[in-house]
Amino acid sequence: MKLSFLTAGLAITMGCLHLSPHTTAQAFAQTSAINELENTEGVIHSYSLEEYASELHFPKSMAILPNDTLLIAERDGFVTVITADKSRSRFSLALPELYTQGQGGLLDLLVIDSETSSGNSANDVSVLVSYSKGSDDSNRLAVVKTTLSLEQGFGDIHNVYEVNESKDTPVHYGGKLLALQSGGFLVTTGDGFDYREKAQVQNSHLGKVIGFTIDGAPLPNAPFKNSPYIYTLGHRNPQGLVYGADGEIYQHEHGPDGGDELNRIELGMNYGWPVVTLGKDYSGANISPFTHYKGMQDPLVNWTPSIAPSSMTLYSQTAFPTLQNTLLVTSLKAKQLFAIITQTDKFEVHPVLNSHSASNSLYERLRDVVVDSEGNILVLTDGENSKVMRISPR
């Protein structure tokens, strides 16, 4: 499927999508906030930074329990469990057809039940897991449900959801999970890189935010009746997905060369990719003539040059007052932890730590971030021999 742009009277045809002509002359000024990454002054100044855990093998994400037990998902199907007293165990998760090439593997964990009132013991938790499955020629994103015993490991695995088509690229899976406050769940899906046009095609699950129930059915309030799993469309490689302090859902995603985005996710909305982008192709060529298009959502924040945002969490504790109610964003390319601060409906992006400080040893590719019950910030680094760093008040 090819994306075609016709000059002079511009019409775009993409699968079954037909868009009417619209002005292309709106550029970066249309974005509510633009981060030029010129501000190197950190949001917090009095802190200690220490290594919390090490020797992690290609970790992808973290989840934290109410008792501050940390679950760390590793690419090759293992989960490392670290309790608040730093005792450590590692369990294998036998995911069907786990595919670990490229950006694939075990991707995200979402704890959906850790209460003793559920009938589970205090050491058992129910978990949703996203991962890539298949082979080089045919792979896709999948979500399963399982139970984790903190003493004995994982129980049976139950299929919940799979993207409705396979691809032959090992990249752009998305895979971030979120429990909706109204019930049900969301998972992000990437466009597969070579299949970016699919992000605008409603009968494809590539390049979407997907809504589903614990039983794998679509959510009851589906905006697209012929494609009931689709919650939003027009995404490239969506990563962070969280509720903000205002009760709204926020998401960020990788742009191409430039054009990384922070978006507010609203049911049924179209976020533009690849019709609209503030980035360019890696070759330097234009992907689209549009930086804005009627009926498609502009990003709240545009990161150009790219920071490669990898995950996100809400800081709602009081240990660091200057961070309260901010969104914390990890980045791979920029190698920084950022805070997104809302100022009168504008979004300002600042590094959490002074990027030029000699005490900032966090200048690494960062994969994920969580906050414990005391307000300490736990940051996961990326790669073959990774670690968790803890930022605590001094």
Image (cartoon, rainbow, N blue to C red):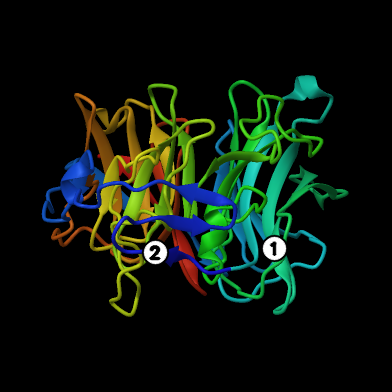
Q: Is residue 386 above or below residue 13?
A: below
Secondary element under disc 1, as helix, strand or loop, is strand
Residue 116 pos. (x, y %): 76, 24
Tag 2 residue = 5
- Residue shown at the point (54%, 50%) measured from the top left: 17
Looking at the image, the residue that sits furthest to the right is 156
Residue 360 pos. (x, y %): 23, 58
- Residue shown at the point (41%, 47%) measured from the top left: 252
Secondary element under disc 2, as helix, strand or loop, is strand
Q: Which amino acid does label 1 sit on?
A: Arg
- Quadrant of the image containing the C terminus: top left
- Residue shown at the point (27%, 33%) measured from the top left: 323
Tag 1 residue = 140
Residues at marks 2 and 1, CA–CA distance in whole angstroms: 29 Å
**First in sequence: mark 2 vs mark 1:** 2
Q: Can residue 159 be seen in this view?
A: yes
Q: In this view, does 353 lie above or below 60?
A: above
Q: What residue type is labelled 2?
A: Phe
Nearer to us: label 2 or label 1: 2
Residue 391 pos. (x, y %): 34, 46
- Residue 321 occupies quadrant: top left
Q: Residues within 10 Å of mark 1 (few under 14, many from 20)?
A: many
- Residue 73 occupies quadrant: bottom right
Is 166 left, or right, of 346 in this rendering? right
Is 8 left, or right, of 89 in this rendering? left
